[in-house]
Image (spheres, helix red, strand yellow):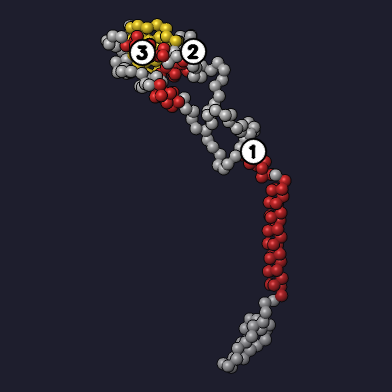
Amino acid sequence: MLTPRGLKGKQYRVTGNTYPRLGRPPKKSRKVIAALAGLLALALVGLGGVQLYDIFTGKDKNASAQACATPSGKPLAAPTPGETPGAPAAAQGDPHAIPQPTAVTVNVYNATTKGGLAGRTAEELKKRGFVIGKVGNAPAELDKKVPGTAQVIAGPTGAGAGTLVGSQIAGATVTADARTDTSVDFVIGDSYNALLDETQAAAALALATKPSPAPTATGSC
């Protein structure tokens, strides 16, 4: 005599030509499964309702605007026409701002044994709009002591002017001294041959003043 599960306690005699018929699961199990299915359906409905509410109330747009805001909380401004994206605007009176050549006075000195280099270089710089100051041999502390193409010297207030003049020749060394004006010394060195052409000089200036890339947020703003 056997009492299989599902026969509700009834005994069954195995005869070899019949088999027990199992009854349905208890009603209690069916009720638990139905309750869990109902809770899952309610959760899905609630989640969909929250998403629809955010879409219609514009919360998604507000979140996107906050993601595209600057650290101060203000939204990023669109670049004005002609402005390089990501490049900081030059503040008025900033000594590192690049001036126009007509605002830069250049003193041209020859530190080599080759005659006439200072005069020819001064003429070329004048054609490019620079104001020419002193032209002649280099002072004793620099005479025959510039092994490269040139040494460009500017003071703290002429840093931008020094960068501009230094971009006119490949391999120039730009250094600073204590002068208080914005003049720039262009000292010709032993490796000097000629200035870069104006297109090359413009490219060198753009490379020298290229800002560091700003970190970008993931996604579009």
Q: Position of residue 104 (x, y in %)?
A: 46, 12
Residue found at x 68% / y 55%:
47
Identity, as a three-letter code, of the amino acid under mark 1: Gln
What residue is pinned by disc 2?
103
Identity, as a three-letter code, of the amino acid under mark 2: Ala
Label 2: which secondary element: helix
Identity, as a three-letter code, of the amino acid under mark 3: Thr
Residue found at x 47% / y 24%:
209
Q: Position of residue 140 (x, y in %)?
A: 33, 6
Relative to 205, does residue 36 appear above or below in the rendering?
below
Sequence order check, earlier mark of 2 and 1? 1
Which residue lies most toward the front here? 127
Quadrant containing the C terminus is: top right
Mark 2 Cα shell of 10 Å, populated few (<14), some (14-19), many (≥20): some
Label 1: which secondary element: helix
Question: Is label 2 in contact with label 1 (beta carbons under 8 Å)?
Answer: no
Residue found at x 67% / y 77%:
25
Sequence order check, earlier mark of 1 and 3? 1
Q: Position of residue 188 (x, y in %)?
A: 34, 13
Question: What label sits on residue 121 in the rendered view?
Answer: 3
Which residue lies most toward the left here? 113
What residue is pinned by disc 1?
66
Q: Position of residue 70 (x, y in %)?
A: 61, 33
For residue 142, say whether it is visible: no
Sequence order check, earlier mark of 3 and 2? 2
Q: Is residue 82 left or right of residue 169?
A: right
Distance, label 3 to label 2, CA atoms, is 18 Å
Mark 1 Cα shell of 10 Å, populated few (<14), some (14-19), many (≥20): some
Q: Viewer-proximal residue, 13 or 45?
A: 45
Question: Is label 3 in contact with label 2 (beta carbons under 8 Å)?
Answer: no
